[in-house]
């Protein structure tokens, strides 16, 4: 248990569906992150939130829409995705952005787009 | 056994042997480095970190070595056990770019009984 919980663990959706991924951290951290993990590629940073404010959008297509209502919760809303968006989506948190170093990751949401 | 980071993404060792996983980082301005372990079906977990003012740091059965001259990082695992089988990632933090953390593609370590 890392203190970061992601739901659902697995999601299958069609290209016209709308779904959301949820992340919750119980660590009292101020920064939360979404990463995409595809086979044989490095972890790709998607979004960073610090004290609920988005501090980074790493050129992510608009079909991915993040939401951070408070420092403990992070959502990734999905709409009209493409098959190449199939991947493991990892949420992480840290006490602060960057300099604290250690990220605490959830176990990921495995997304399959048909 | 040794790996060469991105160019040799798998490493197979015998149980009880020492493992060495290598990582080449890209930017000389990076001043903080972390090794993560990712077991099947789980998210990455922190193993050990090192700052650029150090050459070596030891943990429990793990040692990280940093060679800033050639921008190389290695993770040594002593007496490798089956539970060490996982993918290992290095990450570098770039202070000049809002402390951007960049991950390597990872090396898959398989421990043979």
Image (tube, coloured by chain):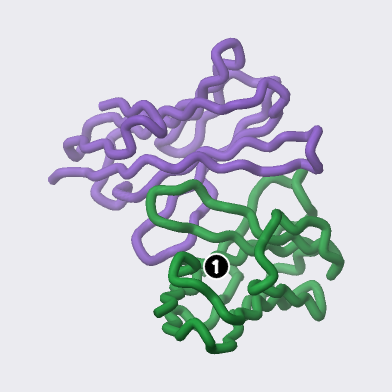
The purple-coloured chain is labelled B
- x then y, percent, for residue B11: 27, 36
Residue B83 screen position, x and y as percent: 29, 52
Q: In the image shown, does B61 or B33 lie closer to the viewer?
A: B33
Q: Which residue is painted at 78% across and 63% down in the image? A: A49
Label total for image:
1
Q: Residue furthest left?
A: B113
Where's residue A83, x and y in %?
Answer: 44, 71
Task: Work out which quarter of the rendered image holds the N terminus of chain B and state it.
Answer: top left
Question: What secondary structure is found at the residue carrying circle 1?
Answer: loop
Residue A5 image-quadrant placement: bottom right
Q: Residue at x 41, y 34 (%)?
A: B6
Residue B93 appears at what percent x and percent y? Answer: 68, 37
Residue A50, above or below B8: below
* The one of A84 and B81 positioned closer to us in this rendering: A84
- Name which residue lies at 65% across and 72% down: A64
User: In this structure image, what is the colour of chain A?
Assistant: green
Q: Is residue A101 left or right of residue B76?
A: right
- A42 above or below A25? above
Quadrant containing the C terminus of chain B in the rendered view: top left
Q: Residue at x 21, y 37 (%)?
A: B12
Looking at the image, which residue sits at the far top?
A: B69
Chain that bears disc 1: A
Local crowd at mark 1 within 10 Å, few (<14), some, or many (≥20)?
many
Q: Is residue A48 left or right of residue B36?
A: right
Q: Mark 1 = which residue?
A: A106
Q: Is residue B36 above or below residue B5?
A: below
Q: Relative to the observer, which residue lies in front, A100 or A31?
A: A31
């Amino acid at each position: 248990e890392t203190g970061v919980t992601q739901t659902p663990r697995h999601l299958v959706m069609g290209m016209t569906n709308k779904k959301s991924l949820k992340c919750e951290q119980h660590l009292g951290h101020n920064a939360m992150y979404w990463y995409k993990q595809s086979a044989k590629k490095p972890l790709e940073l998607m979004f960073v939130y610090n004290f609920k404010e988005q501090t980074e959008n790493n050129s992510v297509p608009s079909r991915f829409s993040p939401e951070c209502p408070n420092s403990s919760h992070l959502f990734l809303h999905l709409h009209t995705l493409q098959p190449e968006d199939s991947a493991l989506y990892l949420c992480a948190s840290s006490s602060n952005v960057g300099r604290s170093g250690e990220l605490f990751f959830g176990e990921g949401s495995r997304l399959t787009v048909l | 056994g040794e790996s060469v980071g991105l160019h040799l993404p798998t490493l197979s060792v015998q149980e009880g042997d020492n493992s060495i996983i290598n990582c080449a980082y890209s930017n000389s301005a990076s001043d903080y480095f972390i090794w993560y372990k990712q077991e099947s079906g789980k998210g990455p977990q922190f193993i050990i970190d090192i700052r650029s003012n150090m050459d070596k740091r030891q943990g429990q059965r793990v040692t990280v070595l940093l060679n800033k001259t050639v921008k190389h990082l290695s993770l040594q695992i002593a007496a490798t056990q089956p539970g060490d089988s996982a993918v290992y990632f290095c990450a570098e933090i770039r202070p000049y770019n809002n402390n951007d953390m960049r991950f390597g593609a990872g090396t898959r370590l398989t421990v043979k009984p």
